[in-house]
Amino acid sequence: MKAGRIVLVIIGSLLVLAGLTAGVGAAALGILAAAQRDDGYLSVPEETYSVGSYALTSQSFEVSPGVRPEDNVATVQVRGTDPDGELFIGIASEADVDRYLAGVAHSELGDVTFEPFSAEYEEIAGTAAPAQPGEQDFWAASSAGAGTQELAWPLQQGEWTVVVMNADATPGVRADLQAGIRSDVLGPLTLWLVIGAVILVLGGTAVILAAILTGRKHGGEYPGPSGGHGPYGYGAAPVPASAQLAAGGTGAPYPARLYGELDPGLSRWLWLVKWFLAIPHYILLAFLWIAFWVATVIAGFAILFTARYPRALFDFNVGVLRWSWRVAFYASGVLGTDRYPPFSLERTDYPADFDVAYPERLSRGLVLVKWWLLVIPQALIVGAFTGSGYVIVRQNGPFGGWDRSMGGGDGGSAVNWATDPAGEGLRSAGGWTVGISLLSLLVLVAAVALLFTGRYPRPLFDFVMGLQRWSYRVLAYAALMRDEYPPFRLDQGPADSRDLPAVGDAARSG
């Protein structure tokens, strides 16, 4: 894929990502707008606040310049009840409140939590007694009297403070208080965000399609070193002896084929920095995967109406999977080669490859259910060894004591059903919890063996390849590329033996 097309994919992916972000924002604002219908307010729970001083004040809050009451940007509501007397609630500028309470003992409300309720107060010392608050004329809004008092104040620019006192200015304030806010701009803002989200997603999709369709090439087999096609159908390397012994296995080959040949001369230490060297790939793949899912959604509608997966989209998506597999094979998912992966969606002579046979027709009905319903059994199994089936070791008690449980994490595979994408240690109440997926554990064992012995254990490599092959088949199926259900089998080795000719046929053809 040429640099210009990659730039278009990045631009399109950024637009789609911005559109999705705007959509999430619109949904959140829409929920808030719905919650304040019928003149309702978005309020914190009512709780009892009690101080022994003359007044309870809020921390000051600043309203941006240019906000006027007539703009109806937002309205603040404060409600309170003093069951034992008359209550005063007022809002005034910070400067006026400071002058009014200068030298007066009062309490400033700090951090508040509601489940369970607790409130922190900062006590400001003083010896003077305040004048009755209702007699002051600097309040922007106020309410006083027996029973429930309520004030509603439209926001306006300035720095403001809420004050709660006994109406007769006596010390010892105790009241059931609740604060809320409403804004009449949430509805219009939600609408504009929805419009912006649609425009951004459609624009980004158009740019991504332009990148995919511009100068595309049909995928094809890479010519092997002798000018023909490699024995795997990939042309990347001759058939190793271990694969020849497994050739001719029973069962039908699956049309999503994953290949990777172990480099016999792996560096003992390079695996320590491969993840860092692969960062440019990770950055580009982040955008390519956004384009991948956009292309998959478009392909889903195309299959629904035409029973065909558009070839350009198919080739692009296979290319993204191929690129991802090369990086995983190099950096984290296998560590099978020291050769740096190419920045390309196309087939090359790299010792790792992935391909999916193009389907001439696909089921219209299956496209509605296979990506979310039918794939569930496969997703659970793949998740068990690539992510959500974390084996966790937890240290409990003051002196340790190890036990095991299940958790979540990232195995670095194509299918990531993880609940802890960082794959790092988790802090629990019982002590430190460390987790690693089965696939990551196997690759780690291989890396340690490589460090100390200079060899990657071949049986371990074959097993890791089987796990990766299974996960990529499931991903190809979930991405609507094939209707054939992925087999419940672990086809180990550099290639699935069902993709290879029988040993006798290979000998005769040689």
Image: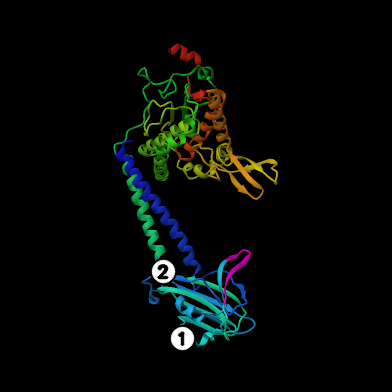
In this view, 308 is above or below 221 = below
Depth order, front residue of 180/240? 180
> Is residue 274 found inside the magenta-colored segment of the image?
no
Q: Quadrant of residue 3?
A: top left
The N terminus - image quarter: top left
Q: Is residue 213 left or right of residue 29?
A: left
The secondary structure type at the circle numbered 2 is loop
In this view, 39 is above or below 381 = below
Q: CA distance from mark 2 to mark 1?
A: 31 Å
Q: Is residue 97 left or right of residue 381?
A: left
Dominant secondary structure (helix, strand or loop) of the stretch shown in magenta: strand
Q: Which residues are magenta?
A: 112-125
Can you give x and y, in whole percent of width and height, for residue 55 in the image? 56, 78
Q: Is residue 163 left or right of residue 5?
A: right
Q: Residues within 10 Å of mark 2 (few under 14, many from 20)?
A: some
Depth order, front residue of 8/60? 60
Residue behind mark 2: 185
The C terminus - image quarter: top left
Amino acid type, callout 1: Asp
Can you give x and y, in whole percent of width and height, for residue 194 in the image? 40, 59
From this viewpoint, is residue 322 visible? yes
Q: Residue at x 51, y 72 (%)?
A: 40
Tally of numbered discs: 2
Q: Residue at x 47, y 25 (%)?
A: 267
Badges 2 and 1: C-beta atoms under 8 Å apart? no
Can you give x and y, in whole percent of width and height, for residue 462 in the image? 54, 26
Amino acid type, callout 2: Val
Q: On residue 456, which mark appears?
A: none
Residue behind mark 1: 137
From this viewpoint, is residue 183 visible? no
Residue extending farthest bottom: 135
The secondary structure type at the circle numbered 1 is loop
